[in-house]
Amino acid sequence: MENNRKNERYQRIYDQIDGLIIDKNYFIANMATIVAVLNNKLDYFFWTGFYLLINGELIIGPYQGTVADIKLEKNKGVCWAGINRNKMVIVPDVEKFPGHIGCDSRSRSEIVVPLKNPDGNIIGVLDIDSKTLDQFDKIDAKWLEKITELLWK
Ligand code: SME
């Protein structure tokens, strides 16, 4: 998708989610809304979901797509890399990412966005898979980070 068109598409998605989130206290409802909008509006999103840190484990939160692991093996895979590095991880080819955890063999590329609460602490990640190699770029990264910040608006 051409960059301007992609930015415009994300702006509309951002505005839609911003309009749907009515109260930051409805945290699970807001996460569910974010994944529903993203997964249905961007056709290259094959699996879209949250993993949340609960007692030091990464546990599945609201998601859209095929059935995923409830708990991710500690310090392994892309989601844990996002937590441990404390930054966004873009994986152009999941088969080349050591320790990648494949919940669905059709996934080819992936992006993981750390979720930081207003105190700056990581509480989980937003994880998105695509069936296309090298699908995610800086535009996805920029907008997905902005969209996760709506959880604390
Ligand atoms: N690929 C992730 C696991 C979650 S699934 O993609 C839904 C990882 O390596 O952490």
Image: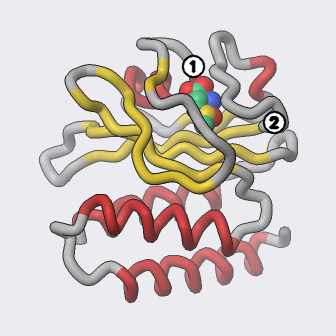
C-alpha gap between disc 1 and disc 2:
14 Å
Camera-side residue of 5 and 33: 33
Q: Which residue is painted at 70% across and 18% down in the image? A: 97
**Residue 103 figure quarter:** top right
Q: Secondary structure at mark 2?
A: loop
Q: Quadrant of the N terminus?
A: bottom right
Where residue 36 appears, x then y in whole percent?
55, 68
Q: Which residue is mark 2?
A: 108
Q: Which colour assignment does the render follow?
A: secondary structure
Q: Secondary structure at mark 1?
A: helix
Q: Is residue 34 above or below residue 73?
A: below
- Residue 116 is tagged as none
Assess disc 2: are there few (<14), some (14-19) or many (≥20) residues with their C-alpha within 10 Å of its C-alpha: many
Residue at the farthest front position: 67
Judge from the rendering whether residue 109 lies leftward or rightward of residue 138; answer left or right.
right
Q: Amino acid at mark 1?
A: Gly
Q: Amino acid at mark 2?
A: Arg
Q: Which residue is painted at 40% across and 45% down in the image? A: 61
Q: Is residue 27 above or below residue 18?
A: above
Assess disc 1: are there few (<14), some (14-19) or many (≥20) residues with their C-alpha within 10 Å of its C-alpha: some
Q: Which residue is mark 1?
A: 77
Q: Which residue is painted at 27% across and 37% down in the image? A: 122
Judge from the rendering whether residue 2 lies leftward or rightward of residue 149; answer left or right.
right
Please report whichever mark, 1 or 2, sits nearer to the chain's N-terminal start: 1
Where residue 142 appears, x then y in whole percent?
53, 59
Marks 1 & 2, CB-CB < 8 Å contact = no
Where residue 98 appears, x then y in whole percent?
67, 11
